[in-house]
Amino acid sequence: MMESLEVKLARVEEKVDQVLRRLESGDKRFMELDARVTELERKLTGYAYVITAIAFIVPLALRYIGG
């Protein structure tokens, strides 16, 4: 038997709805990942500042201690 046009349209509509739900879920996951990456970038920037300070202070301290 041939499916009616209404049944075929209903199937297409359901598939479109499924795609939209997955896209919304993907948007939420992307935003969560973006927040995590931003936090990691902040931490890495802080570590870079600490390393820079140590790289500057240690030679000065060694020169002072060494005479």
Image (cartoon, rainbow, N blue to C red):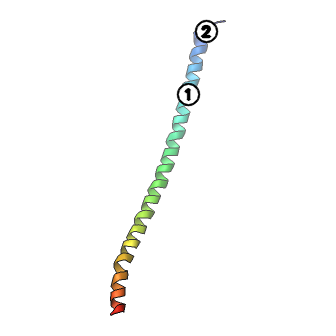
Residue visible at 43% across and 61% down in the picture: 42
Pointer 2 residue: 4
Reply above or below: 40 against 61.
above
Position of 38 with respect to 9 (left or right) is: left
Dot 2 falls on a residue whose secondary structure is loop
Dot 1 falls on a residue whose secondary structure is helix
Q: CA distance from mark 2 to mark 1?
A: 20 Å
Q: Earlier in the sequence, mark 2 or mark 1?
A: 2
Task: Give whichever of 32, 60 is nearer the camera.
Answer: 60
Percent across and percent down for residue 27 are 49, 41
Position of 52 with respect to 9 (left or right) is: left
Pointer 1 residue: 17
Task: Give whichever of 64, 11 is nearer the camera.
Answer: 64
Task: Give whichever of 27, 62 is nearer the camera.
Answer: 62
Image quarter of residue 10: top right
Amino acid beneath label 1: Asp
Amino acid beneath label 2: Ser
Task: Give whichever of 12, 66 is nearer the camera.
Answer: 66
Percent across and percent down for residue 31 are 48, 47
Label 1 neighbour load within 10 Å: few <14, some 14-19, many 20+: few
Residue visible at 56% across and 16% down in the picture: 9
